[in-house]
Image: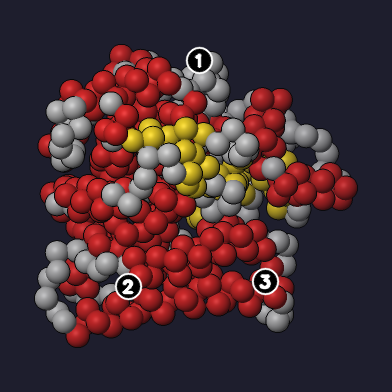
Amino acid sequence: MPAAIDPPGPGRATARSRLLGYLAFRRDPLNFLTRLAREHGDIVYFNVGSQRAYLLNHPDLVRDVLVNHQDHFHKGRALQRSKRLLGEGLLTSEGEHHRRQRRLVQPSFHKRRIESYGDVMVAYTARHTSRWRDGADVDIAREMMHLTLAIVGKTLFNADVEEDADDIAGALTEIMELFNMLLLPYSEYLERLPLPQTRRFERARAKLDSIIYRIVEERRRDSRDAGDLLSMLLAARDEEGDRSGMTDRQIRDEVMTLILAGHETTANALSWTWYQLAQHPEVERQLHAELDEVLDQGRRLPTVEDIPRLRYTEMILTESMRLYPPAWVLGRLAIKDYEVRGYVVPAGSLVLLSQYVLHRDARFFAEPELFDPARWAPAARETRPAYSYFPFGGGARRCVGEGFAWMEGVLLVAAIASRWRMRLDAEHRVETYPRITLRPRRGVRVTLESRTERQ
């Protein structure tokens, strides 16, 4: 029988400790969760306001929640509240609706279909960076946001959305800033009030909706297969169900989810990668050596066929997402009592699995704070257990766009780094900003250096 005691944690749940725990979690969730794991072990019980919460910090426990016992859980409060933006898309939906949407969306991410977008990714990167100038000071995080938005616009809509880029990026930034409001206790009631934050959120969401519905309406009128993801979503039929397709609302929800997952997360992964490369010249030299060899000294751009030879490039991206995973925590709500190592997690409790915390665990990553792409060489990778690294989640809800993201990340790093270096602005302090995704607070200021002009 499971023990009738709670796992280790920061102390008895008094009203004061619950309030302090909630404030600490909101103020600095990365350090708060890291400290809990280091002080209390693999299973930590604490309170976030009135919510019982359990941090599970071992690969076996992560696998059990995401794979072996996934039927014990629904998405946590953060993603439930994300429905205010994403609706019932793949990221937030549950049960049969999620299974049906997964069946409808999955073919859009078939390997051959994804690979067909490689040329688009590289061409848009070349077009974007052609506007860069040697010696220019830029916010590389902002640059990556605009670039990945243009790419997702073309691959998702077959549309050049650069004219909407500022509106979309501005609306997403506004939503990220306001997202914490949605997680406040009783926010379901607060958002009914005419508060300035609520109105700003509604305006930002309405801006995104207007752009998406306009494109969907235009495509409905022109039923041709444009070779993009939207065409496949519009044509998809549930062969295992009633053979019906998706309504405009369902299309909108999936498109909004794909914009966030295919634009926001990739841009963040790339921003943190440039941040790391700018601080590690030896890693950068090895990267340039690989790119010069594979891409004929920068005389051509990368293609999908080059990816198997861009091993070190992929290792750099993998290591960057270890230290700064775009999805930094997963939350699951226990829908029935769940036993874990002799303890019982009661139904209604929140279970947290933090990529940020586990990816920095010295049991699985020696010198975990060190940026070291060599730890992703095949022999080293095989020494670590599955789910010690899980930037895309796992199980039935593993990110459907994972292949798309890896291909885009490798191609963009290769295309840009073959011709450019980044030098950090010494006066600009880069900090983590954990919201829905792990952004760099106030961006990443760099000076661009052209490799071709300085050779």
Residue at label 2?
Answer: 251
User: From what the image shows, is residue 211 above or below residue 289?
Assistant: below
Image marks 1 and 3: residues in contact by CB distance under 8 Å:
no
Q: Amino acid at mark 2?
A: Ile
Mark toward the start of the polypeptide (1 vs 2): 2
Residue 406 shows up from this direction = no
User: From what the image shows, is residue 188 above or below residue 404?
Assistant: below
Q: Could you say which quadrant of the image residue 108 lies in?
A: bottom left
Residue at label 3?
Answer: 197
Horizontal relation, residue 189 to residue 62: left or right: right
The quadrant of the image that shows the C terminus is top left
Q: Amino acid at mark 3?
A: Gln
Q: Residue at x 63, y 54 (%)?
A: 348
Coloring basis for residues: secondary structure
Foreground label between 3 and 2: 3
* Separation of residues labelled 1 and 3 (CA atoms): 43 Å
The quadrant of the image that shows the N terminus is top right
* Separation of residues labelled 1 and 2 (CA atoms): 44 Å
Q: Secondary structure at mark 3?
A: helix
Q: Secondary structure at mark 1?
A: loop
Horizontal relation, residue 58 to residue 399: left or right: right
Residue at label 1?
Answer: 366
Horizontal relation, residue 102 to residue 116: left or right: right
Q: Could you say which quadrant of the image residue 449 lies in?
A: top left
Q: Amino acid at mark 1?
A: Ala
Q: Residue at x 28, y 83 (%)?
A: 217
Mark toward the start of the polypeptide (3 vs 2): 3
Task: State the image coordinates of residue 40 (x, y, percent, origin top left).
Answer: 70, 27
Question: Quick one: 290 or 316, which is closer to the camera?
Answer: 290
Task: State the image coordinates of residue 32 (x, y, percent, origin top left).
Answer: 70, 37
Task: State the image coordinates of residue 149 (x, y, percent, origin top left).
Answer: 36, 58
Question: Quick one: 420 or 254, which is closer to the camera?
Answer: 420
